[in-house]
Image (tube, grey):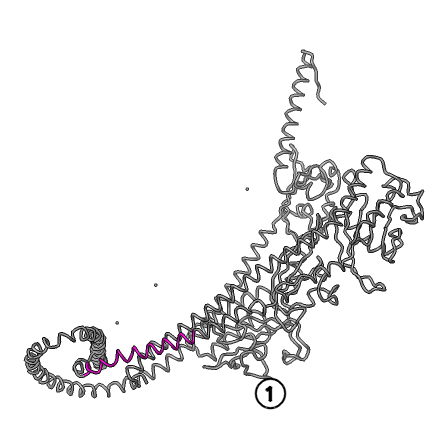
Amino acid sequence: MLKRMKLRHKILFAVGLPVLFISALMTWLLLLHIDNTLRENALELAQEMAYRHGNEVKSRLELPLDTARTLAHTFEGMKKGGKVPDREILNGILKNILINGRDFVSVWSCWEPFVLDGRDDEYINEKGNNRNGRYMPIWHRFSGKMRLDALSDLDYMEYARYCRLARSSGAEIITPPVELSFKDGPAFYSSLIVPVRYNAQIIGVVGITILLNDYSDMVARIRPFGAGYGILVSGTGVIVGHPRKMLIGHPVTEYVREEYRTSLIRSIQSGKPFCFEGASLMHPEKEAYFVFAPFRLGNSDTCWSFAVSVPMDKVLEESRHFARWAVLTGSLALLIMILMIYVLSRHIVKPLYTLVTVSQALAEGNFRRRANLRSRDEFGMAGQYIDSAFDSVVDKMFWYEGMLDAIPFPISVTDPEMRWTFINRAAENILGKTRAAALGRSCTEWNFHICDTDQCGVALLKQGKTNTRFQHSETGTHYQVDVAWLHNARREKIGHIEIIQDISESVRLKQKAEDRNWVRSGEAELNRVMRGEQDVAGIGKNIITFICKYLGAHTGIFYIREPESDMFSLMASYAHVRRKHLASRFREGEGLVGQAALEKVPILLTEIPEDYIRIESGLGAAPPRSIAVLPFLFEDRVRGVIELAAFREFNALEMEFLTLAVRQIGVVINMTEARVRMRLLLKKTQSQAEELQVQQEELRQANGELEAQTQALKISESNLLSQQEELRVTNENLEDRTRDLELQRDDIRKKNRALERARADIAQKVHDLELAGKYKSEFLANMSHELRTP
């Protein structure tokens, strides 16, 4: 097409198309940058608003928490000062706090029995006390009027649960929102609980219950970007504040996409920020960006979150407006540029016409107990010697004990009746008894399952065996027991010594080595099976047969990808009975075979329906316990699929072997298919060689014609020399006329510069054509030489 186009159109095409592409690309990149910038700015603003409004809510929530904390410290001070006032005075304090607390619904306290003032017997069934006189008052407004009750008169189990939690954790507690129904409608409450400490013990708790409905009104006034809104979420993920009051009390995860639910609730409970994009809770048909900012209340372990929803249509409104402006401006600029290129091309092309006749002859073309004797006679000397000997023995005993204690392995020494006479520190740690407590007790108190059996270390020693191994039935730890006789100076057996070693790591490494050897042996044997000149069907049969036998699988199928297709057909099988209703070809994404090929990952099924598939023999048939479907790839392209079934589940080691095996199978299948293609190409090459021999003769004839043309070119060159002489004479005449055209010199020089640039372009094209002709001649010569050379 370009060959038939005029030069002016070629310039328009060569310059205008890149300009159009670059302009469109720059406009798209600019719009993308602006869109991303607006999104980032909106995210930063939403995060700032979420943290700012979250801190406002936190400040308001911490007012009752500070009040509860102050009340707890007041009780602690009264208790420490030993001047606990009458309970009526304490009730009055609680009442005043409730009166002065605008958001307070109840103020209450719960004390351990006989801890406050030791006068529980005097307040049995009194107001603010339970039937045992335990102090647990609650001033509340639940009925609309302020009154005093005992916690046991209300829903005490709910209060008792959080009181126990505060006593056990020692931290401040913020209870999850609770919904209560009243004449005016439902209301949500939460309690802020502070423990009361005395002598480093928690003797009671103080709590303030607040109404959360006002927080919803506070949240409703927050309108980011005019159309956004705020959400207050408790530490359990329940919505506490929202412009749509019907959502309050519902889990926030009900209104977000399923892929965000788990991450969102984890972030809320762990006190971490979380951002995501999803459907707006106010307008589900619109997308919004949500930012959850956590804040921790007081010294509690509870984190609440304040979320801000930013409408994406408002965020991107400026970007869309700029996009329309950019497209309009870019189109106008592009139109002007194309017009300028068109005008410029006319000025470039016009003078080239005069050069065509002058240059038409140029055409050819580039990675870690003492004696204590003080007398100086023989007895004193003997006492000193004995004391010295005792000291020496004790020192050696402690030295030996210290040496044995330094050994990290448990060491047990028993007498002939198998009663302990010594255990080292490592044995104390395992036994849970001190050395003094264990002395004289039976060694069966090891509580190992081999104790008091014929597998006991001492029992085996009597049989002539010096060690045994066993696995702890509860912990699964592997132990090795080395046992030996203890002899006195007369070589009489006086007891036994046992050394117990934890060999779990050694057993694990040995098993790991055995597993590794099993996998490597299987890989080596599989390589042997795939070795040699085989076609795809033969090698597939050998592979599926070997894998089924090596793994103990009871049936298997080998699928291969059809050439230039996404279909996989059954190539070979092992113990598989074909059925008319069962497919032998699968497309990518169809069935388990197609799905494994599509996802490029193995599929393992362990719950097989009774009527799914049956493994048959001459004696009967039964469904398998597990099915494994594994694709094998080469260079990230699925070349086939292996499907295995067995009466047992495939373990992790077997799946590891299969994962390694399919990598080799993919390579071998690719090599086999390549070998088949090479054979076909060889046949095709042989036929092409015969055709080239025929063409060689034609090239010889063409060479003869080229020689004749060369002779004609020489004659033409002689004619050109004569014409050159004529041009010289003409140039001398033109020099005379040049003097008359000096007034037009400036205009001619401008045209000459344009001609020079065009001449350089033409010369380059001529040079390129010469190189192309030269390479063509060399190619024909080389081809001719290769065809003549056997």
Considering every residue shown, the one lying at the far top of the view is 376
The answer to whether residue 466 is magenta is no
Whether residue 218 sits left or right of residue 603 in the image: it is right
The reply to whether the magenta stretch includes residue 354 is yes
Q: Specify the principal SS of the magenta part.
A: helix
Q: Amino acid at mark 1?
A: Lys
Can residue 643 be seen here? The reply is yes
- Total marks in image: 1
- The percent coordinates of residue 235 (x first, y second) are 70, 57
Q: Residue at x 15, y 88 (%)?
A: 705
Can you identify the residue that label 1 sits on?
A: 580
Q: Nearer the viewer, residue 414 or 773?
A: 773
Question: Which image quadrant: the C terminus?
Answer: bottom left
Q: Indicate whether 318 appears above or below 306.
A: below
In terms of image quadrants, where is residue 427?
top right
Front position in the image: 745 or 441: 745
| Front position in the image: 578 or 302 | 302
Between 260 and 722, the one lying in front of the other is 722
Q: Residue 298 at x, y = what percent? A: 70, 48
Percent coordinates x, y for residue 134 in the rendering = 89, 46
User: Which quarter shows the N terminus?
Assistant: bottom left
* SS at mark 1 in the image: loop
Mark 1 surroundings: few (<14), some (14-19) or many (≥20) residues within 10 A: few
Q: As drawn, which residue projects farthest toward the front?
A: 743
Could you tell me residue 633's position as x and y percent? 48, 72
The answer, for residue 450, to whether it is visible in the render is no
Asked if 288 appears above or below 441 in the picture, the reply is below
Question: In screen coordinates, is 262 left or right of 151?
Answer: left
Vertical placement of 329 versus 1: above or below? above
| Residue 304 in which image quadrant | bottom right
Looking at the rendering, the stretch of residues picked out in magenta corresponds to 330-356
